[in-house]
Amino acid sequence: DSGLYETAVFLPVDSVGMLNYSISITDVGNNTFHFSGHMNVLDIIAPVIASQIPSEWTTGDALTLIANVTDNIGVLETSYQWHQNALSGEGDMVLNTSSGLWTAELMVPNSTEPLNLTIHARDVSGLIGEFQATLVIVDDDPPEAICQAPRDITIAQAVVLDGSASTDN
């Protein structure tokens, strides 16, 4: 009797690499055929990034990025990029081995324009996962008032206060 026989083997998602297999077929006459081989199991699952970054930050303050990055075979590196109009920056994130979280710190520019953030994670197979967020930047820094005033004045004298040296972010 000839025919097509199929079977399925389910591999765990971390079963990446060379898979060796062996097949034995025995017919009704007790004749057996053995065959061995191998196949390369490729990783097709990119890292997944979950981040709980608050959507609102304040000008000139440190922004701590925290990302939980998971992958079926292992995360190799995680980095971030940001841009805010003509300003931009990038950096690597560091794995905290106790918590398993990737972290980095960046300084929020002194601009209230939205800050666009992207976190990238690359696994050992070279696949890249991505997380994107647009952060609202709020100005919470008061202006610095510098006022030039005369030291002495007389009664009924008009006084001009010069605040032109004052600054604001």
Image (cartoon, rainbow, N blue to C red):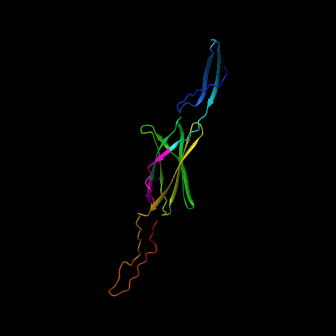
Residue 13 left/right relative to 33: left
Compared to 33, does 52 lie above or below?
below
Q: Where's residue 38, x and y in %?
A: 64, 25
Residue positioned most to the left: 155
Screen quadrant of the N terminus: top right
Residue positioned most to the front: 1
Residue 38 left/right relative to 138: right
Q: How many numbered marks, from 0 up?
A: 0
Q: Residue at x 40, y 66 (%)?
A: 142
Residue 54 left/right relative to 43: left
Q: Which residues are magenta?
A: 49-62
Q: Where's residue 163, x and y in %?
A: 43, 75
Residue positioned most to the bottom: 156
Q: Residue at x 49, y 59 (%)?
A: 109
163 falls in the magenta region: no
- Pick the residue in front: 111 or 5: 5
- Pick the residue in front: 36 or 66: 36
- Pick the residue in front: 158 or 1: 1
Residue 155 left/right relative to 16: left
Residue positioned most to the right: 2
Snapshot quadrant of residue 56: bottom left
Q: Where's residue 3, x and y in %?
A: 66, 24
Compared to 5, does 138 lie above or below?
below
Q: Residue at x 42, y 39 (%)?
A: 99
Compared to 89, does 166 lie above or below?
below
55 falls in the magenta region: yes
Q: Where's residue 75, x and y in %?
A: 53, 38
